Amino acid sequence: MPRPLYLYNTAARAKELFAPQHDTVGLYCCGPTVYNYAHIGNLRTYIFEDILKRALLSLGYPVRHILNITDVGHLVSDADAGEDKMEKSARKEGKSVWELAAFYTQKFMENLHDLNIVQADLFPKATDHIPQMIAMVRELETRGFTYRTDDGIYFDTTKFPAYGEFARLDPDSIRPGERVAMGAKRSPTDFALWKFSPKSSKRQMEWESPWGVGFPGWHIECSAMSLAYLPQPIDIHAGGSDHVRIHHTNEIAQSEAATGRKFVRFWLHGEFLVIDRAKMAKSGGNFITLDSLKNEHIPPLAYRLFCFSAHYASPLTYSPEGIKGAKASYFNLLRSLAGTSDVADPGDPATNYYPEAIPRILDDFYQAVYDDLNMPKAMAALWEIVHDETIPPGLRRAAAGKADEILGLDLLAGNPQPSLEEFAGISGPIRVYSAGMLTDLQKREIVTKVGERQRARGDKNWAAADSLRQELLQFGAIVKDLSDGSAEVTF
Ligand SMILES: [Zn+2]
C-alpha cells in the first residue's frame, strides 16, 4: 500500500484521500491555446501539475498524462462571442494559422523543457480530433441536449439539471445582460458545441460536419480528447482556477450528458500568479514570459523554485524583488550541495546507513508533498537537510537528490568545474555554479573571462579586473573572490 495522498478536490470543496479508479492513473491537464507565448502565470499551472505527477510517480502509481494543445476555434470571449484568437493572431503576425500554431507549440515545448517538466505521454492537438468532437456532438444531439441557431449547434444547459453544481453557480444570478453575449442562445449558460463558418469571410481552419462547414466550440475538445485517451471516470483533471466557472463546468455537462456516466473523480485547480494585484494575462500590460526572465538572467529553474513559495491553490504575487530572491536562494542551494562528491557514496536512502536525522527530515518532506502538495512546507524540510551541519555533506547531497526527484530543480547540477589544466594560464582555481540555461559555448566564454580576470588580479591590474567583472555581469555571471585566492562564479 502506498502512503496516503491527500488532494483538494474542487468538486467536493474538500481535501480527499486519493484512490485511483484504474490500474494506471489517468491525468488530463488543459493545455495552452497556441496563439501567443505562454506567460509565467500560465506556466505556474504546469509546474503545479508536474509536482502532482511526480508525487503520484513517487508513490509507485503508473501515470498516463495527457496535455492537449488547443490549436483551433477558441474565441476571444469564453461566451462564444468575438473573434477567433488563432485567426486574429495569425493575421497580426502575417502567418498562416497552421504556422502560428506550430510556432507557439514549439515555444511551449521549450518552456516545459526549460522548467524540467516531465513530458506528458501525449500532447493531442485539437485539429487532429475533429471527428471525435463531431461524434460527441452527434451523441448529444441524439440524446436531446442540443439545439440549432443560425450560427451553430448549442448545448442546452436547462436539459442538464446538475449544470453549475460543480462551480456552485447560482442559476438565478445568471441573467442575460451586458456581460453575456446572448446571440440566439436560449439561456445565458448555453454554449457552442459547433460553430458555423461566417458567410462573409473565409476561415483558414474549417471542417465539414453533419450541420455544415464550421469549427468546434472550445470546450468540446477537452471532453472528446480526454475520453479518447483515458478511461472513465478519469482519475484527475487539472487546470487553472479560471476554468472552474465555464470551461470545466461545460466539460462536465457535455461529457456526462453524452455518456450518462461520471466524467472525472478529482478536479484540481491552480491559482493565478498576480502582479500589482492583477491577474497576469495576455491582454494586460503585465505579460512576462520565461524568455523575458532569461533575458534578465533569471534561470527557469529559479522561477520553478519561486513557485514553491506558495501553495498551488493560493495566489502567488510576482515581483522583481521576489524573483531575484528566488534566484539567490536557488544558487544558495546549488552552492550548499556542490563540491561534496569526495564523500563516499551514502548508499541506498532506504538503508539504515543514514544518520537518524535524514529519514526524519525526508519524512517531513514527503509528508508535506502528500498533504495536497504543500511545497512551502516541503521546501522548509529541504532547507533543514541542506543546513544541518551534523549530517556529512555527502549524505545531505544524497538526501537532497532524493527530494529532487519531486522538486525537479536539478539540485545536484552545481558541480565544481573545470580544472586548472583545462584553462591554461589561469592562476587560482575557479568554482562554477551554473543553472544550465546557457550553451556550453557561452559557459566556456564566461569561464575563460573569469580566467582572464584571475590573471589580471594576479598581476595586480585592478582596473582590468574590474572591467572584466562588469563584462561578466552583462552575461548575468556574478564573480566572488574567495579568501583563498580562488574565484567563484554563478550564472
Ligand atoms: Zn480544457
Image: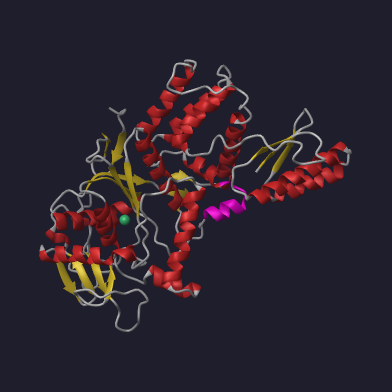
Residue 418 horizontal side relative to residue 63, left or right: right
How many marks do you count on the picture? 0
- Tell me if I can see residue 249 in this picture: no
Percent coordinates x, y for residue 322 in the rendering: 55, 42
Where is residue 61, by image quadrant?
top left
Residue 401 counted in the magenta span: no
Percent coordinates x, y for residue 225 in the rendering: 28, 57
- Rendered residue at 34%/58% (across/down): 124
Magenta segment: 289-299
Quadrant containing the N terminus is top left
Residue 100 horizontal side relative to residue 20, left or right: right
Where is residue 281, by image quadrant?
bottom left
Q: Image height check: is 113 above or below 393?
A: below
- Tell me if I can see residue 443 in this picture: yes
Residue closest to the far bottom: 200
- Rendered residue at 61%/31% (across/down): 338
Where is residue 91, by image quadrant?
bottom left
Which scheme is used to colour this image of the protein? Answer: secondary structure
- Rendered residue at 72%/40% (across/down): 479
